[in-house]
Image (tube, rainbow, N blue to C red):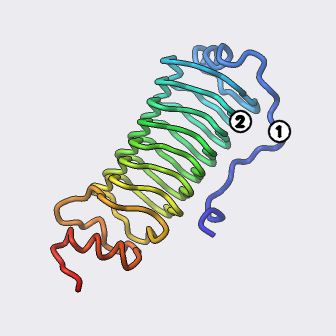
């Protein structure tokens, strides 16, 4: 299975529950310290600046970060469970061996980030922005990314399974070796030449839809 090709987060044990929550995260940012081996549950933050946050072997559960700023942050071996990151900004951040499970990220910005060994499952991230990201060993399943932007990305080993990509943009992002047969891809945004489609695997109905972009008529 595709998900098995992605290295999962490494947690030596269930992280200890953080006693101070958001204040502790803010203190770590100010002191340039890494947040490590902690579990954060039920945090609620709005428009907070957590720029340059570094977290390793952490778990965030039922947390809500509305319109918060996480630019140039780093997350390693970290799990996000049932969290809301709507309209947050993770531009130019780094993710390795992370999981997003049943999360929400309407309009979340990841532009310019490096994202490796990431699984995104059961999540809703319509209009999320992954412009100019480096995506390597990423598995996205049972999720909704309508209108999401994956333009000008560098990609390697990216897997899609039952994902709603209606209206998503893959402008100047090569889709070679990807498989969209279980996903919804109506109205994709591509370059005029549709060069992005070269080497992409689709089913018969998707091929008929995409052929119209190439000026072909299938009888």
Q: For mark 2, give the secondary structure.
A: strand
Decide: marks 2, 1 in contact (CB < 8 A)?
yes
Task: Identify the residue position indicated by label 1 in the image.
Answer: 14
- SS of the residue at dot 1? loop
Tell me which residue sits at (67%, 39%) in the image. 81
Task: Name the disc covering residue 70, or none.
Answer: none
The dot on residue 59 is 2
Residue at the image point whose x is 35% and y is 72% from the top: 206
Q: Is residue 131 above or below residue 159?
A: above
Residue at 60%, 44% (x, y): give it. 100
Q: Is residue 156 left or right of residue 186?
A: right
Q: Please state if 81 lies on the left or on the right of 208 as rendered.
A: right
Task: Give 172 or 85, whichever is nearer the viewer.
Answer: 85
Q: Quadrant of the image for the C terminus?
A: bottom left
Q: x and y percent of residue 3 in the render?
A: 62, 62
Nearest the camera: 163 or 73?
163
Q: Quadrant of the N terminus?
A: bottom right
- The picture places residue 157, in percent across and down from the top left corner, at 50, 64
């Amino acid at each position: 299975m595709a998900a098995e090709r992605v290295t999962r987060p490494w947690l030596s044990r269930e992280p200890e529950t953080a006693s101070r929550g958001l204040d502790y995260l803010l203190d770590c940012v100010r002191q340039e310290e890494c947040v490590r081996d902690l579990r954060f549950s039920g945090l609620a933050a709005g428009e907070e600046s957590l720029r340059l946050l570094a977290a390793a072997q952490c778990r965030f559960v039922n947390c809500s970060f509305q319109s918060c700023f996480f630019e140039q942050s780093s997350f390693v071996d970290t799990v996000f469970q049932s969290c809301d990151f709507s309209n947050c900004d993770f531009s130019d951040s780094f993710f390795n061996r992370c999981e997003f499970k049943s999360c929400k990220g309407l309009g979340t910005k990841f532009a310019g980030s490096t994202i490796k060994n990431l699984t995104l499952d059961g999540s809703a991230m319509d209009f999320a922005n992954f412009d100019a990201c480096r995506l390597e060993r990423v598995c996205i399943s049972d999720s909704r990314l309508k209108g999401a932007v994956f333009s000008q990305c560098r990609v390697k080993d990216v897997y899609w399974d039952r994902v709603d990509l209606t209206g998503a943009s893959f402008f100047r992002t090569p889709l070679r070796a990807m498989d969209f047969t279980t996903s919804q891809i109506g109205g994709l945004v591509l370059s005029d030449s549709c060069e992005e489609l070269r080497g992409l695997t689709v089913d018969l109905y998707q091929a008929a839809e995409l052929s119209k972009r190439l000026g072909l008529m299938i009888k």
